[in-house]
Amino acid sequence: MKSDSASMIDRQLPTSEAVALLELTRDIALNTLGPGVDAAEEHGEFPAAVMKTLGQAGLLSLPFPTEYGGGDQPYEVYLQVLEELSSVWLSVGISVSVHSLACFPTAEFGTQDQRDRWLPMMLSGDTIGAYCLSEPQSGSDAAALTTRADLTEEGYRINGRKAWITHGDIADFFNVMVRTGQAGAGGISCLLVQSPTPGLSAAPRERKMGAWASPTAGVLLEDVEVPTDHLIGDMNHGFKIAMSALDAGRLGIAACAVGLAQGALDAAVAYAQQRRQFGKPIADFQGLSFMLADMDTAISAARSLYLDAARHKDAGLPFGVLAAKAKLFATDTAMMVTDNAVSVLGGYGYTKDFPIERYFREAKVLQIVEGTNQVQRMVIGRALTHTDSPS
């Protein structure tokens, strides 16, 4: 269990409102998320009641305008809320991040009418969204997607299959990237599909290594009909929407990774202080204390990276490459920290009696989602050599 004081000690928050928001989040994380995490993860149960509580507290709509029911909080605050949630329960942090990702296209690229019609529903806390980009044969190569939407007299008819979709079998609305034109990035559009819609269904859930309470499933679209006014942005300009959403989503995953790493470090430190060998706490042994010091330093560095990117975003400055750096470093840090935390606990770290085993399994997926870390390195490398970045 995460300690009650570790992760907020040195936070820099821009307003007193943000301080109160983080205190509320920590209280919810410890007293609402904490007691239920083990049972829900063990049985793979999506925490619908928890998400409802977060929605009522306004934590599902933080970075969006108040006129639509959002919290109008800067990204640097929203991401620290994600970190707090993920330090106790990663599946919940991922769900909040993905829901925000699913709201992003309408909020940023929708018409005024679309924002007025749909954002209040999306941000109310009563619905859950999904973001549908990846396909069985187009993951990192997102521009190669083949799910197609053909124009009809009434709107669009969608056929295809999406893969690895968080909330794929429970979402109330889906932002679906579809091919409406030529091959490649220039022929992709974004359509909003609401559930239930005839022809929209989900494949069986993926059997994952971790984050079992976060449902991941393929989304099947068979002659799914949507009206023309469900097109978000301009036709054949959806790839820009997809990439803009991913830049923001990568920051969400970076924050989740830092939270997971912080939770693992807190648990490792608590254990090292109470576990005694050779007449003293194992935390007093230099080899172990140096390991903890390296873990803590890496977490601080990862937090600084994602906050720097968030502050660029809040200032309206380019932040895509910074988001790639933050996602890369934070998720690699989460993998390193959870690995070392298992070692701190020794045999106990390999058992389900302590949360470290779960943290370790969960860390791996963060290096994969929202663009693998190999893709992040490509984004950063190509920015250095002034060539176009990949998806």
Image (cartoon, rainbow, N blue to C red):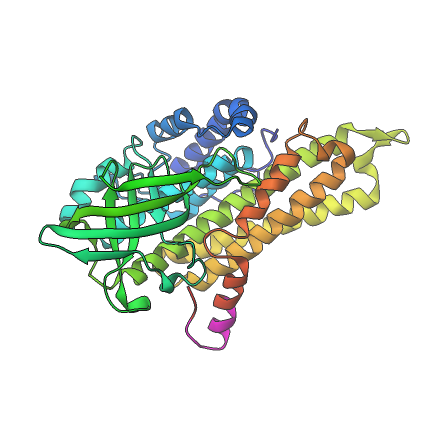
Residue 167: tell me if it is visible: no
Quarter holding the C terminus? bottom left
* Residue at 24%, 55% in the rendered image: 109
Quarter holding the N terminus? top right
Number of residue marks: 0
- In the image, 82: left or right of 52? right
Q: Position of residue 101 (x, y in %)?
A: 36, 47
What residue occupies the far left of the structure in this picture? 153
Q: Position of residue 160 (x, y in %)?
A: 31, 52
What residue occupies the far front of the structure in this picture? 222
Q: Position of residue 312 (x, y in %)?
A: 41, 58
Q: Is 385 included in the stretch rendered in magenta?
A: yes
- In the image, 71: left or right of 11? left
Q: Position of residue 88 (x, y in %)?
A: 54, 33
- When the figure is inspected, residue 8 is found, relative to residue 275, above or below; the finding is below
Residue 334: tell me if it is visible: yes
Q: Is 193 included in the stretch rendered in magenta?
A: no
In terms of depth relative to the viewer, which is nearer, 256 or 221? Answer: 221
* Residue at 18%, 47% in the rendered image: 226
Image quarter for residue 263? top right
Image quarter for residue 218? top left
- When the figure is inspected, residue 43 is found, relative to residue 369, above or below; the finding is above
Highlighted range, magenta: 380-388
* Residue at 33%, 60% in the rendered image: 146
In terms of depth relative to the viewer, which is nearer, 9 or 305? Answer: 305
- When the figure is inspected, residue 100 is found, relative to residue 188, above or below; the finding is above
In terms of depth relative to the viewer, which is nearer, 195 or 71? Answer: 195
